[in-house]
Amino acid sequence: MRPFALNYALPAEDSPAISSYAYDSTLQLNVLPDGRPAISDRAVLLAAGATASTAGSKTHFDD
């Protein structure tokens, strides 16, 4: 038996490649290769879900 929802499900569109980001310890931000904060790029947020680094996890248990 095929679930009802699968009759209407569509394959996901290919998402554009996202720029990788890296943690900049000087700024204490995740930054894109061009130096902008990663939070400013909507595509990165949509693809990654967040731009959280592990920096806070070492000092705060609730990150």
Image (tube, helix red, strand yellow):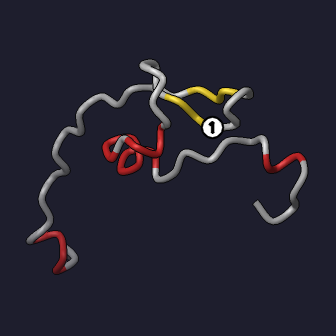
Task: Mark 1: give few (<14), some (14-19) or many (20+) Cα within 10 Å.
Answer: some
- The front one of 30 and 4 is 30
Question: In the picture provided, is 16 more to the left or to the right than 24?
Answer: left
What x and y, as percent, mark residue 19? 39, 26
Q: Count the marks.
A: 1
| Residue lying at 22% horizontally and 77% vertically, measured from the top left | 3
What is the three-letter code of the residue carrying label 1?
A: Leu
- The front one of 25 and 44 is 25
Q: Does residue 55 sit above or below 1 in this rendering?
A: above
- The front one of 10 and 17 is 17
Q: Does residue 61 sit above or below 28 in this rendering?
A: below
| Residue lying at 9% horizontally and 71% vertically, measured from the top left | 7
Q: Does residue 22 sit above or below 48 in this rendering?
A: above
Question: In the picture provided, is 6 more to the left or to the right than 24?
Answer: left
What x and y, as percent, mark residue 40? 40, 43
Q: Disc 1 designates what residue? A: 29
What x and y, as percent, mark residue 2? 19, 73
Going by the picture, which residue comes out furthest to the top?
33
Instruction: Pick the quarter of the image with the C terminus.
Output: bottom right
Instruction: Pick the quarter of the image with the N terminus.
Output: bottom left
Q: Quadrant of residue 17?
A: top left
Q: Does residue 55 sit above or below 49 in this rendering?
A: above
Question: In the picture provided, is 43 more to the left or to the right than 7?
Answer: right
Going by the picture, which residue comes out furthest to the front?
27
SS label for mark 1: strand
Going by the picture, which residue comes out furthest to the bottom?
4
Question: In the picture provided, is 44 more to the left or to the right than 24?
Answer: left
| Residue lying at 72% horizontally and 26% vertically, measured from the top left | 26
| Residue lying at 23% horizontally and 33% vertically, measured from the top left | 16
